Image: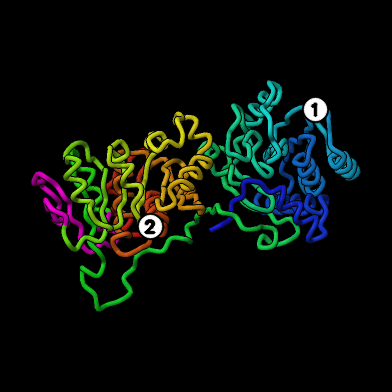
Amino acid sequence: MQNLFKEVASLDRRCYNDFALTEELLMEHAADGMADYVAKHYERGAKVCIVCGGGHNGADGVVLARLLQGNYEVSLYLPFEKYSEMTVLQLKRADAVGVKRVSFLERCDLLVDALFGSGLSRAFDAKTETLIKAMNDLEAQKIACDIPSGIGLDGRVSSESFRADVTLTMGALKLGMFSDEAKDFVGEVLVLYLGVSRSLYETSTPWKLLEVEDLVLPHRLEHNTHKGSYGHLSIICGEKPGAAVMSGLAGFSFGAGLVTLISNENADLPYELMQSHLLPETTTAIALGMGLGCEFSNIELETLLDNERPLVLDADIFSHPLLSRLLSRENIVITPHPKEFVSLLKVCGLADISVAVLQKERFKYVELFCAHYPKVTLLLKGAHVIIGQKSDYFINPLGTSALAKGGSGDVLSGLIGALLAQGYQPLEAVIQGSLAHTLAAVNVKRNSYALKPSDLIEAVGNL
């Protein structure tokens, strides 16, 4: 798990004030980290073109050019006329060691974007958009210095933004690099040290990035147990029973000792799943909403939910009149996709926005919801899953477009429900269920377009 920061200017100032480091020292360390990456991944003599702006990010690129000079065929392209004092100083040093300056974008093996970095706070003009388009069209490996040009610290992506294969970011991870919009632009993200360890450079932050190593599977470590030791997940089975079946099978595969589908009609179910018209007394968690439709009356649902058992809500429940009452419960998890979350924000009186607006400001609206509903654990689906509870937030970046299939969300609800049934606290159940969900998708040996919910369920058992 790594820290995520909305801005790092304050962290840089802390280096100046507390550690007596200077802007120039931080710049040298940043460029040295980039040079080390280049040396490890590209053969000596490769042609490297570094495109630099006139500010701090551009100065980083100029220092990189100086460090690579002599081992690589380096060229500097500076398309703008105004330079900061630091950039002027670094250009003097680069000129002294013979770095070549060019007046156009050269063909190369490696293209480095050092135009704007995290300091971008304005829209691009036509000249800049044309330049970045040309950089994207160039056939070369591409590295972004700090953050790809065109991506703001809030995660918004300009109409034309640099598409990096690798982003070498300075000091700490920026939250904006993990917006849904940014996912297709940042590539692999690596953090470079700036003269002190990350443990010293970084401060506390409510936002965290989940990693593969954070997955803790519900392994059974005790031998003297029985099926009741691992909880009983009950799933409300509505008009579209297939959704509940997929959730049930996922829950059964992720450790729940018993899984029962609650239905008004008898259904032909897989043999692993039980069926009932009433909520079993042994139920330890409930999942509701997947394929619900109008199968149950409000009174029937109120009766089923008249208890304090942990609850995971998904899909159809987000347009149900009972929703606002359910949000006041303890131990509740909700797993909306963006359209459902927009509807939820409106019902709750928090915001009346479009899905497009939400997608540009996902961090903002997750924080807004969690502040008003501190009892609820939220999982907002997307290219990057966002998890929030009270003032703690997590991003799961491990998802894949293979999950963009009907039924994937039903499986996720079953995984989370299984952990709730086994006694996990809601936040931990959501984190572990989400990690298992995304990593199972990565492990499925199928083309990205061919994933089925049954593949996911099987892969969960092999994590």
Q: Amino acid at mark 1?
A: Ser
- Image location (x, y in percent) of residue 101: 83, 34
The numbered disc on residue 426 is 2
> What residue sits 24% from the left and 57% below the top?
233
Q: Which residue is mark 1?
A: 103
- The quadrant of the rendering that contains the C terminus is bottom left
**Residue 113 image-quadrant placement:** top right
Which residue is at the far top?
126
Give me the C-alpha separation between circle 1 and circle 2. Answer: 57 Å
Density class for disc 2 (Cα within 10 Å; few <14, some 14-19, many ≥20) is many
Q: Answer whether labels 1 and 2 touch (C-beta < 8 Å).
A: no
Going from N to C along the chain, the mark reached first, 1 or 2, is 1
**Residue 225 image-quadrant placement:** bottom left
Q: Quick check: 77 left or right of 6?
A: right
- Image location (x, y in percent) of residue 336: 37, 41
Q: How is the image coloured?
A: rainbow
Q: Amino acid at mark 2?
A: Pro
Query: Bounds of the magenta span?
Result: 251-279
> What residue sits 81% from the left and 54% below the top?
25
Mark nearest the camera among 1 and 2 is 2
- Image location (x, y in percent) of residue 290: 26, 43
Look at the picture and state if 123 lies above or below 460. above
Dot 1: element: loop
Density class for disc 1 (Cα within 10 Å; few <14, some 14-19, many ≥20) is few
Q: Quick check: 285 left or right of 165?
A: left
